[in-house]
Amino acid sequence: MSLTKKMPFLLLLAFLVLLPGVAHAATHVVSPDESLYKIGLQYGVSSQRIKSLNGLKSDSIYPGQKLYIEEKSKYRLVPGDSLYKIARMFGLTTQKLMSDNGLHSSVIYPGQTLVIVNGGSQSGPAVSRGGNGSMSRNDFDLLARIISAESDSESYETKVAVGAVVLNRTRSGLFPDTIPGVVYQVDNGRYQFEPVLNGWIYQPASESAQKAARDAINGWDPTNGALYFFESWVPNKFLQSRPVSRVMDSFTFSY
């Protein structure tokens, strides 16, 4: 093997280091007197993140309970690195890499340290999709977060409709075929969803949005297959020209 071919591997060894206190185990067995806060400190993650990944509705846990914990590591950037290269190195998407690090743009610099959440979009216990197979915890969490960011002030049915539109896009052939791909898609230099631009997508999903995500995953589509939604007053000629499926609360859903 030539030195050139060895370089990516050598750089990986040189700059990939484990976060202090992070175990490789994908699960944590709760011990007596432990709390989500203490477990979060041990693994370098927030208690809210642990709750989200495990579908917990409260901070209550019990001895012997198994909790899924994301595996994390750090990567320090070197000259010539790009988000695309780093994402490919670890089997991730650039959108996921940006999401995991709270990045709002692709601008990075040598010496910067990025958190690598292992496993890409398939990491974490699967969430049932009814007759459609399974969905990773990460994808479910992202779907719930976009529902929450876009429609938490709307009715429950509208929340489900927003989730259905995202899922419809993954199956349409006109958009990326993954939930991260759809949510973080940039078209003509613009994000498809405003919460990605303003950062609301990085806020934890509400309990109602998580429930709506599950209903959408399990096949409830109040829009009957819509691919777009927008606030009805928005003066966008393209959106306003689309065939309308339904008008729900402040949103218009269209094909």
Image (spheres, rainbow, N blue to C red):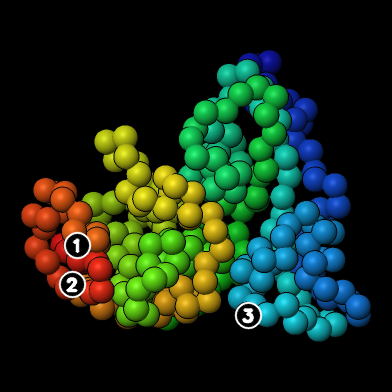
Q: Residue at x 23, y 52 (%)?
A: 174
Q: Alpha-carbon neighbours of circle 2 within 10 Å: few (<14), some, or many (≥20)?
A: some
Report the mark closest to the observer, 2 or 3.
2
| Amino acid type for the residue under numbered disc 2 | Val
Residue hosting label 3? 57
Instruction: Name the spot of residue 96 as percent of width and height, x first.
Output: 52, 48
Q: Residue at x 83, y 73 (%)?
A: 35
Up-down: is 102 above or below 109?
Answer: below
Disc 2 and disc 1: Cα gap in Å? 8 Å
Quarter of the image for the C terminus: give it.
Answer: bottom left
Q: Nearer the viewer, residue 205 or 225?
A: 205
Q: Alpha-carbon neighbours of circle 3 within 10 Å: few (<14), some, or many (≥20)?
A: few
Residue hosting label 1? 232
Q: Is residue 220 left or right of residue 209?
A: left
The quadrant in which residue 64 appears is bottom right
Disc 2 and disc 3: Cα gap in Å? 31 Å
